[in-house]
Amino acid sequence: MIMLLTAAQAAGGAPGVLIDRIAAVVNDDVITLSEVEAAVRAFEAEGQGQADRSKLREQVLNDLIAERLLEQQISASDVTVDDAEIDRAVQDILRQNEITEDQLQQALDSRGMTMGQYREDLRDQLLRLRVIDRNVRSRVSISDEDVREEYERRTRNLAKKEIIRISHILIPFDGDEASANAKALAARSRVIEGEPFAEVASDVSKGPTASSGGSLGEVDVAGLVPEFKMAVSQMRVGDVSEPIAVQDGFHILVLQDRRFDAGEAYESVAANIRDQLYQREVERQMQIWLEEVEAASAVERRL
């Protein structure tokens, strides 16, 4: 699925300062070079950078264009989300994360966000989901034959994969590596002393996953950056890593689960495979739909 990015807005230029370059024009909206660079830095800070930075910039620009197109589709639609639905979404988040309203408010305060801003973010997310449902999910259908074929494809090669569930805290260098290391060590100490990792992550992490307690979900160890791979190889479930320097920041990992996937009976995995195939097809149809929207729009890339 496209990465829905939130890029930093370019600051207004003072007299004598070069005006920000235009990276792309999407109908009547402009994407600036500073937005692209901010998004690239965010990916690099999360350890998701590429060796070829120019390719990463191209990928990020394409994602920002897709984001603008989606925002424009939302604005042009008649889809709405009322306050009662936002209330239910907040309660769902509290229940899923096992936190109170006061704890949520504390997490928002630490990130300089008001409850009103948070609720508007939720409204935007729900609007996105509804527009995607209307234009994309109606195109998706997964048959029993699709599920069986995928199961057989997976079980042809039964090499064991190490799957782990991890969360992380990111403290960016911000030009002062020593200070960042001290902050990372302080965050780790809070966890070691008994404070829930998710609360510390929500409080101090500067990564995109901070609002979800730093959760990275289940990941294949083989796909981790080398620094993470080395760290988790020496960890047991429940361990909290020392600060790990990756790209532009220090990361603290907590290993929450580890399993080895060597294949299971069809009946036990069919539902999960169907969900995965469904999500994969949603992502594929989402890309097709956005390409159709772009083809019908005035989009000019200037990078």
Image (cartoon, rainbow, N blue to C red):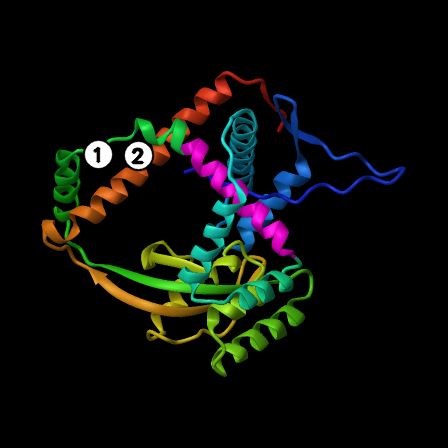
Marks 2/1 in contact by CB < 8 Å: the verdict is yes
Residue identifier under label 1: 142
Q: Residue furthest bottom?
A: 193
Q: Residue furthest front?
A: 84
The residues tagged by marks 2 and 1 sit, at their Cα atoms, a distance apart of 8 Å
Residue identifier under label 2: 281
Q: Residue at x 58, y 17 (%)?
A: 298
Examine the structure image and report whether residue 33 is included in the region drawn in magenta. Answer: no
Looking at the image, tell me whether mark 2 or mark 1 is earlier in sequence order: 1
Q: How many marks?
A: 2
Q: Which residues are magenta?
A: 113-132
Q: In this rendering, is residue 67 above or below 190?
A: above
On the image, the x and y values in percent for residue 288 come to 39, 25
On the image, the x and y values in percent for residue 99 come to 47, 67
For label 1, the SS is: loop
Q: In this rendering, is residue 289 above or below 32?
A: above
* Mark 2 or mark 1, whichever is nearer to me: 1
Q: Amino acid at mark 1?
A: Ile
Q: Amino acid at mark 2?
A: Glu
Q: Residue at x 49, y 74 (%)?
A: 242
Q: In this rendering, is residue 196 above or below 263?
A: below
For label 2, the SS is: helix
- The answer to which image quadrant residue 222 occupies is bottom left
Q: Main secondary structure of the magenta part?
A: helix
Q: Quadrant of the N terminus?
A: top left
